[in-house]
Amino acid sequence: GLFVSVGERGIDGFVHVGFGSRPDGAEISYHRAFLSALCVAPSDTSNEVAALLFETAENYALSRGAKDIVAVGEPPEVPFYLGLAPGD
């Protein structure tokens, strides 16, 4: 899921959470979610936007059946961004 926070001056931030595949790669596994990106505007000095985005991502993952959420993953546990850059 991709969630965007929009404030009075435009986009305040976004969060991207996804799921990996089963070990055989045959289909998506919702057991573990991966917080692929959480970005906020530098003006978010109170961390309110970041906290809200993280909570939104967590609720989404749990609603899909995730039992745990990984915030920093290494290949192959970065389901969306793996393979976007040359050489990945």
Image (spheres, rainbow, N blue to C red):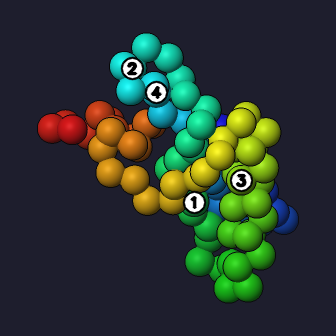
- The type of residue carrying mark 4 is Ser
- Give the image quarter of residue 12: bottom right
Q: CA distance from mark 4 to mark 1?
A: 21 Å
Q: Residue visible at 68% across and 69% down?
A: 50
Residue bearing mark 1: 38
Q: Using a 10 Å C-alpha cutoff, classify the residue at mark 3 as few (fewer than 14 neighbours), some (14 to 19) or many (20 or more).
A: some
Q: Are marks 2 and 3 in contact (CB under 8 Å)?
A: no
The secondary structure type at the circle numbered 3 is helix
Q: Are marks 3 and 1 in contact (CB under 8 Å)?
A: no
Q: Earlier in the sequence, mark 4 or mark 1?
A: 4
The secondary structure type at the circle numbered 4 is strand
Q: CA distance from mark 4 to mark 2?
A: 5 Å
Q: Earlier in the sequence, mark 4 or mark 3?
A: 4
Q: CA distance from mark 4 to mark 3?
A: 19 Å
The secondary structure type at the circle numbered 1 is strand
Residue bearing mark 2: 25
Which residue occupies the foreground of this view, 84 or 57?
57
Q: Is residue 2 visible?
A: no
Q: Residue visible at 74% across and 44% down?
A: 62
Q: Are marks 4 and 2 in contact (CB under 8 Å)?
A: yes
- Outermost residue on the right side: it is 8
Rendered image: mark on residue 58: 3
Rendered image: mark on residue 21: 4
Q: Of discs 2 and 1, which sits in the foreground?
A: 2
* Quadrant (top left, top right, bottom left, bottom right) of the N terminus: top right
* Quadrant (top left, top right, bottom left, bottom right) of the C terminus: top left
Q: CA distance from mark 2 to mark 1?
A: 26 Å
